[in-house]
């Protein structure tokens, strides 16, 4: 049997494990629409790239194994892929990022896990780290990938192609237009 000392040590280790494992939490700064194959695709979805088959990839997110990660959505067939830092997978239920009159998005060049102003976060990982959206060009495609700032690389895994980590990549950032400008534009037209 275990001695009391060993049992105490085991209990401590167990408590530490519990403390380290979180369930990812969605970030709600931006507008995300819950979707699946049977729902019509949202109009203002944000474009992220295109896949090796030439289809456009829209920006999405999924919760997988306790982490919120970015997803690539092929609108035509609702084929949705995503990756963590160790797994490439597909999803049938997902959220789609949408813009509106005052919130739009753009990709900016970045590198090395630099924290860009207004970078869009999908949420947190199972280790309670913020997860961002990156993209890189490879294999005749522009893939949306997963950016953990601490890893300093854009992580892209897709189907059976060899996984890659990019030190230079683009990051999705939000651009806010003041509501007043929108009003002004409307008056001119
Ligand atoms: C798709 O989403 C709708 C609305 O959220 C839900 O009612 C429906 O059950 C979902 N269908 C599938 C196949 O998950
Ligand atoms: C756009 O979305 C943001 C975030 O949800 C919201 O605060 C803002 O009011 C929206 N703008 C318009 C014009 O609906």
Image: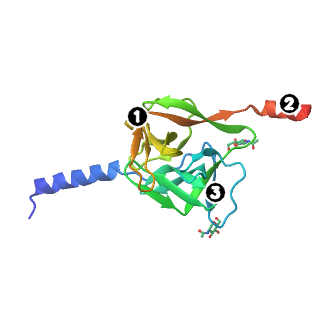
48 vs 137, nearest the viewer? 137
- Give the Cα distance between marks 2 and 1: 41 Å
Q: Label 2's element? A: helix
Residue 35 location, x and y as percent? 62, 60
Residue 121 against residue 160 in the figure, above or below: above
Residue 74 appears in view: yes
Q: Quadrant of the C terminus?
A: top right
Viewer-proximal residue, 181 or 20?
181
Circle 2 packing at 10 Å, graded few (<14), some (14-19), many (20+), is: few
For disc 3, the marked residue is 75
Q: Are marks 2 and 1 in contact (CB under 8 Å)?
A: no
Q: Nearer the viewer, mark 3 or mark 2?
A: 3
Marks 3 & 2, CB-CB < 8 Å contact: no
Give the side of residue 10 with respect to residue 41, left or right.
Answer: left
User: Can you tell me which quadrant of the image ligand 2 is in?
Assistant: top right
Q: Name the N-terminal-most of marks 3 and 2.
A: 3
Circle on res. 73: none
Residue 12 position, x and y percent, is: 22, 51
Where residue 142 appears, as percent x and y from the top left, is 54, 43
Write down the residue under mark 1.
152
Q: Is residue 149 left or right of residue 184?
A: left
> From the Cβ of disc 1, is ligand 2 less than 8 Å away?
no
| Ligand 1 closer than 8 Å to label 3 CB | no
How far is the residue under mark 3 from the one under mark 1? 30 Å
Q: Which residue is mark 2?
A: 184
Q: Secondary structure at mark 1?
A: loop
State yes or no: Cβ of the residue under disc 2 lies below 8 Å from any atom of ligand 2: no
Is 126 left, or right, of 17 in this rendering?
right
First in sequence, mark 3 or 1: give its number. Answer: 3
């Amino acid at each position: 049997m275990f001695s009391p000392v060993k049992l105490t040590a085991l209990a401590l280790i167990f408590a530490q494990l519990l403390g380290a494992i979180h369930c990812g939490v969605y970030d709600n700064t931006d507008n995300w629409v819950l979707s699946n194959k049977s729902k019509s695709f949202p109009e203002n979805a944000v474009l992220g790239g295109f896949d090796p088959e030439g289809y456009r990839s829209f920006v999405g997110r999924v919760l997988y194994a306790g982490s919120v990660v970015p997803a690539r959505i092929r609108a035509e067939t609702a084929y949705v892929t995503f990756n963590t830092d160790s797994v490439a997978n597909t999803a049938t239920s997902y959220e789609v990022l949408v813009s509106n009159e005052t919130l739009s998005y753009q990709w900016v060049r970045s590198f090395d896990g630099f924290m860009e102003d207004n970078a869009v976060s999908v949420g947190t990982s199972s280790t309670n780290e913020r997860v961002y959206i990156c993209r890189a060009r490879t294999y005749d495609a522009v893939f949306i990938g997963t950016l953990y700032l601490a890893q300093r690389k854009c992580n892209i895994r897709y189907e059976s192609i060899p996984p890659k980590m990019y030190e230079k990549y683009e990051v999705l950032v939000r651009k806010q237009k003041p509501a007043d400008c929108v009003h002004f534009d409307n008056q001119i037209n």
